[in-house]
Image (cartoon, rainbow, N blue to C red):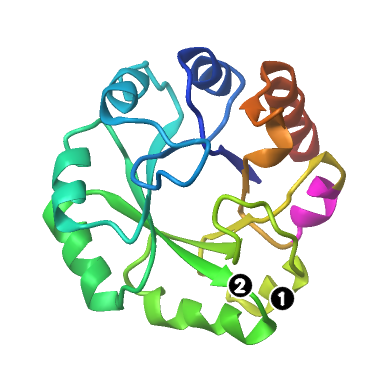
Amino acid sequence: MQAKICGLTTAEHVQTCVDYGASFCGFILNYKKSHRFIDYKTAEILTNIPKQNTSYVGVFVDPTEEELDQYSKLKLDYFQIYGNFNSDDISKIKDKYKKKIIVALQIKEKKDILNYKTFEQVADIILFDSSGLHQSLSWDFNWVKDVPQSITKMLAGNINMDTLENLKKITDIVDVSGALETDKVKDVKKIKEFLNKIKKIND
């Protein structure tokens, strides 16, 4: 099981994630309502940190073409996209910007899981997230058990240390943000503990 640490805002936090083996670092790039939002200049600095085996992910909510044009210049490996897009839209974005794509689906009820079928041919990873965007809301992760093994699955929504053991059976990647914060700021100690726990589970 891999880990994505999302909503990073400082060089120290990014470096910690890289050093401790996070598979993905996520940056909130155009969603100003989030306390994890960073401006372009900060994003440029953070994505220039040598990433070793980590992939850098730009997170977008309903991005405009202008925003994607601008942020495609950063050293991002993935675009993670929330919003009202169809498979053709995603395919065009992927072709134009030469980025891998994480399509984020917001899950309120079990039937929402089936939306993966729209994107299974074009997304590199499908993220099953809560409906709360920057709020870490809980939902029933067991709903994704019916999603085929051929799809690379990422889960988000109030994930914490205690739930990790069970999640290994149902997802390829966990996406964590709020659980690694103290007073809405990423906590280096919590990041280290979390990534060490992932390593232990995988051993």
Residue on which the image places disc 1:
143
Are there few (<14), some (14-19), or many (20+) residues within 10 Å of tag 2?
many
Q: Residue at x 42, y 21 (%)?
A: 52
Residue 58 shown left or right of residue 71 in the figure:
right
**Residue type (three-letter) at the residue carrying disc 2:** Ile
Image location (x, y in percent) of residue 51: 40, 22
Image location (x, y in percent) of residue 116: 48, 77
Residue 38 shown left or right of residue 63 in the figure:
right
Image location (x, y in percent) of residue 3: 61, 40
Residue 106 on the magenta segment: no
Q: Principal SS element in the magenta part?
A: helix
Give, as a single range, the part of the protein colored magenta.
163-169
Are there few (<14), some (14-19), or many (20+) residues within 10 Å of tag 1?
some
CA separation in Å, label 2 and label 1: 10 Å
Which is nearer the eye, 195 or 140?
A: 140
Label 2: element kind: strand
Contact, mark 2 vs mark 1 (Cβ under 8 Å) = yes
**Residue type (three-letter) at the residue carrying disc 1:** Trp
The image's mark for residue 107 is 2
